[in-house]
Image: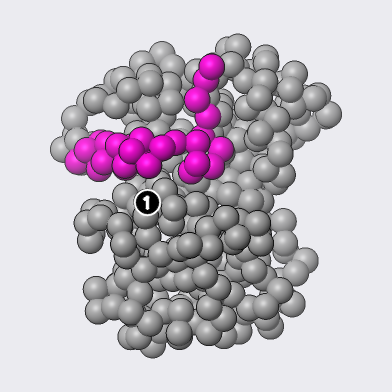
Amino acid sequence: MARHFLTLNDLTPQELDAVVDHASKLRNEWRQGKIRDTLRNRVLAMIFEKSSTRTRVSFEAGMTQLGGSALFLSPRDTQLGRGEPVEDSAIVISSMVDAVMIRTFDHDTVETFAASSSKPVINALTDDYHPCQLLADMQTFREHRGSIRGATVTWVGDGNNMCHSYMNAAAQFDFNLRIACPEGYDPDPNLLQAHADRVEVVRDPVEAARGSHLLVTDVWASMGQEDEQKAREKAFQEYQISPALMQVADKQALFMHCLPAHRGEEISADMMEHKSSVVWDEAENRLHAQKALLEFLILNRLD
Ligand code: CP
Ligand code: NVA
């Protein structure tokens, strides 16, 4: 049976720690110019039903750097876009490649694909979760501040796919999470209930940020919610990360954003370059974290 990575819960906390540590090792090796070809002749199929910059470049470059290759598949040019059942596509595609990465709308689609796939399936973002981003975020925190265990993390903004993955991360990496979101934009109530021991909704972003070790946000309107942009701009007015908000956080607090960022909306114009910001490392770490994940899933080992 292939191991999949549809949410952070598909790996144990120990496995997640090992992947994140391995990612830092790969980053150092890569920066030293060392050649690594652990995935020689291996192929990753990448199915994108939504736009992407970081995810596509990091997976494609990552496979090439490890000696393998990646195929970009869009529904526009494949039979998936013409109604071939997901199950049939999964059987066929997985019979020819070594792993499949999917970015799509319904989380059910990646689950359905994985159930019929003979090879590992990686969720590269659905409407509900974005676990690959969390590997990079956890790696980045660890590289800058050491273990995140016991820390307080504050999510400011929409209770969206990224927020849900932060909720899973709170349990898997053992930290506390405060979610500052406007009413009507809460995360999934079932997930909130399941994580009630370490995750709480705090409406006031200033209260939520007080003493926190990491402030994170994301766009107000995610992909697929373009029609709601105007309504969301109104609802999220008070939910912006700015240097003033960082002031109430811990002195050593970091700022992260999965990107793309909308300056003047979820962050003030000066936040990307603020001294607390690690957004560029966070983005680069998508490459290293996913190379570690690919080795883990395809080779079943990390060394
Ligand atoms: N953060 C992230 O997943 O970026 P892309 O949408 O550019 O892949
Ligand atoms: N929440 C955002 C994340 C983009 C990487 C979206 O789903 O569009």
Picture quadrant where residue 59 is located: top left
- Pick the front one: 15 or 78: 15
Tag 1: amino acid:
Phe
Boundaries of the magenta span: 1-28
Is the C-beta of the residue carrying label 1 under 8 Å from the nearest atom of ligand 1?
no
Q: Quadrant of the N terminus?
A: top right
Q: Quadrant of the C terminus?
A: top left
Q: Which residue is mark 1?
A: 173
Give the x, y percent position of residue 200.
52, 70
The residue depicted at 57 percent of the width and 55 percent of the height is 194
Q: Residues within 10 Å of mark 1 (few under 14, many from 20)?
A: many
Q: Is residue 272 visible?
A: no
Give the x, y percent position of residue 23.
29, 39
Indicate whether 79 appears above or below 146. Answer: above
Q: Is residue 142 left or right of residue 212?
A: left
The residue depicted at 32 percent of the width and 65 percent of the height is 151
Q: Is residue 111 left or right of residue 208?
A: right
Picture quadrant where residue 79 is located: top right
Q: Is residue 63 magenta?
A: no
